[in-house]
Image (cartoon, helix red, strand yellow):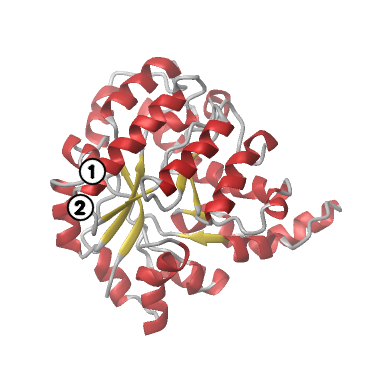
Amino acid sequence: MRVITVEEHFHHPRAVARVLELAGLGPVVPDDGFADFLRNFMPDQDSAERLAGNRLAHMDRVGIDLQVVSHGANSPGNLAHPEAVELCRRVNNDLAQQISEHPTRFRGFATLPLYDPTAAADELKRCVNELGFVGTLIAGSCAGLFLDDERFDPILTAAETVDLPIYVHPGVPENPVSSAYYAGNWPAALHFMFSGPAFGWHAEAGIHILRLIFSGALDRHPNLKLLSGHWGEFVAGWLDRLDEAVGWTGHRLDRPVSAYYREQVWATPSGMYNQNQLNFIVAEIGAERIIYSEDFPYVIRDNVSEFVEQANLSDDQRHAIAHGNAEGIMPL
């Protein structure tokens, strides 16, 4: 059985260094143990920066036939600075070069400079038409703005035009949100994790999807395809409540919230290989709305193919999740 994973990341070291230089300090105030925590938390350099080497060996070992790769932490896509345009282009060119060395094993998601939505739309078209990429990944907000803001409409239009998905990935919460919601009487490492992969990222990524629904962006772009990781970033398990509660407000949408979700969003597990979560998401949105992912190199699992092969699924559902659903919306 072919296994395709779609939330897999790499780092462009020079772009990351420049983003860190331009972006300024984050909300986490380091304490005595924070530097050691970061050193242990971050992936090894070879896995993060190269598609060959450790990554390819891991794919062979755990049965992944194809990864769709996108830029990970400290992406220039969210950088609120004019230099983001050139940095994103450099990231995409480097990723395309690495993919060309193993064209049967990798595809790419474009990194887009949200700072300049027109340039971002042009870059998406270039990445698809010239580099062979199969969509884009957007990691959170830019200067506090999410994709529902109408200034980003050129990006949504471009994604609809090329008929390829936007992966709505978690991003770091804005500094005031992080400090107010996730800082407390605990170590800096816990602030970092609470605001990020433990909880905060996922709440914010779910909010991102809901803002696209509430704002009418999905009415303006009814053919837009969205991918949402970590079993739908809380939203996939909240659809009945959203339908009811939004109805109480009198805010009129063309469809129920759950209909937008079930018609325009695909959820991925992001390496959270849990049978109970899989059962629930299949029941809520259907196996035809699940696309497989591992979240390499941040999450590294030994049971990538084993989980989907042994899960409590029908054969049709198993093949749909492992590869068929991804092949249906992307040229893989």
- Quarter-of-image position of residue 106: bottom left
- Quarter-of-image position of residue 111: top left
- Above/below status of 262 relative to 103: below
Is residue 235 shown left or right of residue 282? right
Could you tell me how many numbered marks the image carries?
2
Q: Residue at x 57, y 46 (%)?
A: 158
Is residue 297 shown left or right of residue 219? left
Residue type (three-letter) at the residue carrying disc 2:
His
Q: Residue at x 46, y 72 (%)?
A: 279
Q: Residue at x 19, y 37 (%)?
A: 44
Q: Nearer the viewer, residue 140 or 147?
A: 147
- Helix, strand or loop under label 2: loop
Q: Residues within 10 Å of mark 1 (few under 14, many from 20)?
A: some
Give the x, y percent position of residue 246: 77, 55
If the image is split into quadrants, where does the N terminus sit? bottom left
If the image is split into quadrants, where does the C terminus sit? bottom left
Q: Residues within 10 Å of mark 2 (few under 14, many from 20)?
A: few
Give the x, y percent position of residue 207: 60, 45
- Above/below status of 236 relative to 298: below
Q: Which residue position holds label 1?
A: 98
Residue type (three-letter) at the residue carrying disc 1:
Gln
Give the x, y percent position of residue 141: 55, 34
Q: Which residue position holds label 2?
A: 102
